[in-house]
Image (tube, rainbow, N blue to C red):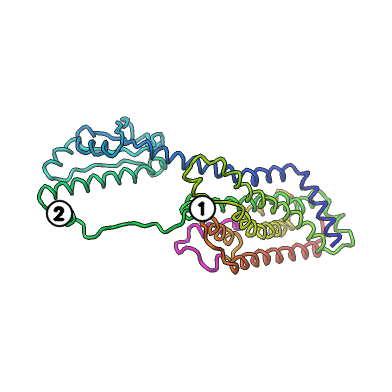
Amino acid sequence: MHTAWMVFVKEMVDALRDRRTLMMVLISAVAVGPLMLAALSAVVSMMEERADAREVMAVGLDAAPTLSNFLVRQGYTVKTAPADYEKKLTDAKLGDPVLVVGPTFEAELVAGEMPRVTVVTATGNQRAQLGTRRLETLLTGFNQERGSLQLALRGVPVTLAQAVEVQSRDVASPQARAAQLTAMLPFFIIMAVIYGAMNAGLDVTAGERERGSLEPLLMNPAPRWALVLGKWGAVAMVGMAIAVLSSLSFLPGQWLMRSEELAALFQYGWREALAFLVLLLPLAGATAALLMAVAIRSKSFKEAQASATIALMAFTMTPLIGMLSPDGEQPWHVWVPGLAQYTLMGRVLRGEGVVPTDVAATVMAAVVVTAVSLVYVSRSLSRSAIK
């Protein structure tokens, strides 16, 4: 253990001297929380501002005074869309869908016919897509109002047109509603932990082999597991530092929120930060060991970097299973490193309870990956001839 401690101290000093490692720690850890919350808050704030603006872009609405009057009574301002609105929607230069009304709208409405209106949008235009549902809801309200008036004029009770009365009730907690907006935060934190330790993990293996400093180290009469344990401790410490800073960065990051609604819904305090750390620290250790196992056979830093990128890409694809799974969370999710952290961190953000057995399964899976990887690195150093 004394040998392992000496190797650990030496590797930590080298890591702190490495500007690439320090920059990765600062950028991926310290900035991830504030930047993500600021960007998310800006998006939500923009959506709120657009909703408060209450504007409708239309073409031919002069031929539909009844519909125009309805929109005005709902508190909306009608604006004439530009002539090239289709091109601007396609190029994302126009942020609102366009309501197109035919010239015979009012005549058909008076005659009891069903006039047709068109809501023009573009799938690739996210801003316009956000306003499409609002506009369709307005048109649905217009249909209901006109239908009710026609029934009332004929002496028919309005309730006959409705078979049932539909009411909606949201049973989700405020944190669960906020988690719909912050669902990507755990994914980015996991990416920061995984990729933040990559430079350190490759440098203590392939980097030393390329510089020729690994051979003198292996000539020492020290057990290989002690050398491996010291190197892994240094790399894991870098990853764990990123995990700690990333989790804590969301605490001051909440000060940058521009959206009052999001700030009220997003409840993240010391309890949530501690829960994140319990889940991320084992992942940092497993990632450090996996990086060393991938790079130990490489002869150069660039070769190890290419191999590690492919391995980590497969490793980081696991959270996507939780995002895209149509069946929701499954019991086996907590046994897959990466996916387990994403699943349980999502529960923390939603304010749900995290079962201790699930946490134990997550930690156990990370420990298994760490142990297998370190044994492989130790045996590789014992068997291989350094060339």
For disc 2, the marked residue is: 157
Snapshot quadrant of residue 92 = top left
Going by the numbered disc 1, the residue's amino acid type is: Ala
Q: Residue at x 24, y 60 (%)?
A: 164
Q: Position of residue 365 (x, y in %)?
A: 64, 66
**In terms of secondary structure, where does tag 1 sit?**
loop
Characterize the local packing of mark 2: few (<14), some (14-19) or many (20 or more) Cα atoms within 10 angstroms: few
Q: State the residue in front, 259 or 303.
A: 259
Residue shown at the point (77%, 48%) measured from the top left: 15
254 vs 376, left or right, is left
Number of residues whose C-alpha sits closer than 10 Å to that of mark 1, classed few (under 14), some (14–19) or many (20 or more): some
Q: Disc 2 versus disc 1: distance between alpha carbons?
A: 46 Å
In the rendered structure, the answer to whether residue 113 lies left or right of residue 377 reads: left
Measured as percent of width and height from the top left, residue 53 is found at 37, 35
Mark 2 falls on what kind of element? loop
Q: Main secondary structure of the magenta part?
A: helix
Position of 103 compared to 35: left or right? Answer: left
Q: Is residue 320 magenta?
A: yes
Q: From this viewpoint, which residue is outermost toward the left?
A: 154
Q: Which is more N-terminal, label 1 or label 2?
A: 2
State the quadrant of the N terminus. bottom right
Q: Amino acid at mark 2?
A: Pro
Give the residues in magenta.
313-333
Is residue 278 shown in magenta?
no
Residue at position x 59%, y 57% from top? Answer: 314
Q: Nearer the viewer, mark 2 or mark 1?
A: 2
Give the camera-side residue of 304 and 243.
243
- Residue 166, position in %: x, y? 28, 58
Q: Is residue 322 above or below residue 125?
A: below
**Residue tagged 1:** 183
